[in-house]
Amino acid sequence: MTEMRIVADRGAWRGGFEERVLAGYRAAGCSEPLARALLERALKGVDGWTLATDGTGWAAVELTRENGAAVGRIHDLTVPGHRAWAERWCAEQGAERVLVRLAGGGAGAFADYPVRGQNRMRAVAEDPQLPPGLTVRRLREDEYPQWYAREEASYVADIVRSGALTPQQAREKSDRDFAEQLPQGYLTPGHAFYAMEAGGAVVGTGWVNHGFLPGVTFGFSLEVYEEHRGRGYGRAAMAVGEWATRQGGDEALMFNVFGGNEVAMGLYDSTGFTVLDEFRSMGL
């Protein structure tokens, strides 16, 4: 067997990699502008990746730091048998775990890596209707602090449940992510907050970002409060997400779901939300 060797010239690899990523997004139902916008995100930092080949296929890897820990990333792997080399390279660089992003889903050579999260998307109805008995209004500014505290606690719990980070790391990540996404808090441009009401009570909230990608609203949160779950409001919340997407002038709704949340994944499967990206990781 020929040994893997690191190469500097990316010409023979780059075009094929981009087409593989685009094919995954197209298969997930993305429009061409959206597929290419997602490709741009997937290519972030590409010039810093380490590329290797043995003449039969490619492996693209990188060492990064996340939440104070060294993390290896396998960005591309065209031959399943090259996984051992990629993991060994990450370990030799000091990585504590290795992470992969799979465009369009499909575990392939990484079926034994636990799922840490997914990005999902679906085109929304042209005129989505809210379920009978459910009303939606904008969250008031005076309600925002309480919403923020509840949302951050839920986000931290989701991260920990996925197995991706420790509680302390999850809290640190939450602080960074909220500061990045909502630099102006309630007044951050492009973001909208909603309260869902039924029977005179607030049963959940929604947080969306319009124009997140071409024609796409990102649903940061469509949350049904625990005391109101089991009454069909989960599906109702998805209808609210579609309604909010059209309110913002977009055509598709996209969101993230953490690994370990099988109930939510089952709901999204049944409501037609396809996997755009799947993130899996394994400790080394």
Image (tube, helix red, strand yellow):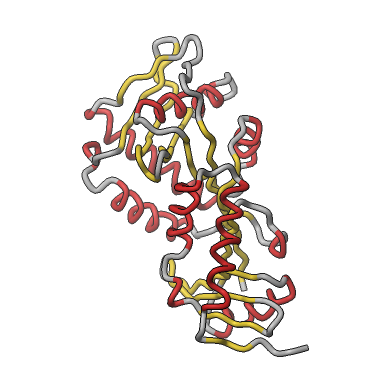
Query: Which residue shows up at 27% across the image and 36% down it?
Result: 145
Decide which of 4, 117 is in the foreground and name it. 4
Q: Quadrant of residue 249?
A: top left
Q: Quadrant of residue 64?
A: bottom left
Q: Where is residue 260 in the image (x, y as percent from the top left)?
A: 61, 47
Q: In which quarter of the image is residue 201?
A: top left
Asked whether, in this view, residue 138 is left or right of residue 74, the answer is left
Decide which of 233, 73 is in the foreground and name it. 73
Asked whether, in this view, residue 224 is left or right of residue 192, the answer is right
Quadrant in the picture for the C terminus:
bottom right
Q: In this view, does 139 lie above or below 84?
A: above
Task: Looking at this view, name the residue that lies furthest to the right.
Answer: 1
Q: In this view, does 164 lie above or below 198?
A: below
Q: Is residue 142 above or below residue 90?
A: above
Asked whether, in this view, residue 203 is left or right of residue 22, the answer is left
Query: Which residue shows up at 32% across the image and 48% down it?
Result: 181
